[in-house]
Amino acid sequence: MNDWICALADLQQQGEPSVLVTIIQEQGSTPRNAGSKMLISASQIFDTIGGGHLELEAMHIARDMLAARSLGPHVQRFSLGASLGQCCGGVAVLLFEPMGQFQAQIAVFGAGHVARALVPLLASLPCRVRWIDSREQEFPTQIPHGVQKIICEDPADEINTLPVGCYCIVMTHNHALDLELSAALLKRNDFSYFGLIGSKTKRLKFEHRLHERGFSADQLQRMRCPIGLNEVKGKLPIEIAISIAGEIIATYNAHFGQQSACAEPIADPTKQLLASPRRSHATH
């Protein structure tokens, strides 16, 4: 069987990391021969290295690697009889290889002029982008590779489909819709980043309305508004887009950099950015 080859191509196309497990050495009786492979993602398994406790243990190790965002290969020796209780009783040495780059998952709500400048920048980064709007005519004819265009009558319906840890950017044409999207994101409260385009005045109005809906000050503090790096000046769409992209890069570098060093997730990778003065985009 070579199901793992097709599966690996599909997973990499989707931007989903996985671990390729290979029997690189066998001694005595083993379920399968050296060279046998299986592919393990967070939710699926493809092919087999023989089943039983060996395969179960390999699955646990691979998923621990995925959870810890391990970037390097790992080799482990298994005594099938003594440690795993398999009747074949031989020895198998397994190679665990992380496959596919860990990518930030980004959702951009709105297809206006700033979004049309921002999305190509995000698409050139190690990111997978969902681009969401109700207005099909606002999207460009050519959608960048790695970007999924989603036309939805009510973009707020897409909130529940987002992966945990998503980076969310709200910049629609409608302030009422921005408010509903903000409330839905804050209610989930499992994002890595939530940025709302707008001025300090817009933030104050949204904070007041969201506080009336029961959101706490701590929850509202996670909402980034205004967004963008203060050091990047200008009001042109591309200038604003570069500023926002820079903040996204700083955030996911902090997140993924620390995640690769330890298994413990960081609670708020944007915490240090909160200390810097925020920029205001007067056009929103």
Image (tube, rainbow, N blue to C red):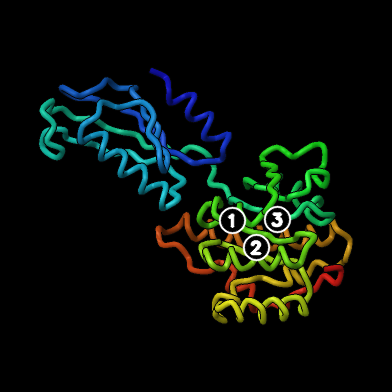
Q: Which mark is residue 159?
A: 1
Residue in front for this viewpoint, 86 or 282: 282
Contact (Cβ within 8 Å) of mark 1 with mark 2: yes
What's the residue type where badge 1 is placed? Ile
Of the two numbered discs 1 and 2 on the same chain, state the one appearing first in sequence.
1
Q: Which residue is mark 2?
A: 181
Question: Residue 27: x, y in percent?
Answer: 19, 24
What's the residue type where badge 2 is placed? Leu
Q: Is residue 61 left or right of residue 282?
A: left
- Specify few, some or many for label 3: CA neighbours under 10 Å numbering under 14, 14-19, or 20 or more: many
SS class, disc 1: helix
The residue depicted at 70 percent of the width and 61 percent of the height is 170
Question: Residue 72: x, y in percent?
Answer: 44, 44
Residue in front for this viewpoint, 257 or 86: 86
The residue depicted at 54 percent of the width and 80 percent of the height is 216
- Image quarter of the C terminus: bottom right
Instruction: Say above or below: 208 vs 23.
Output: below
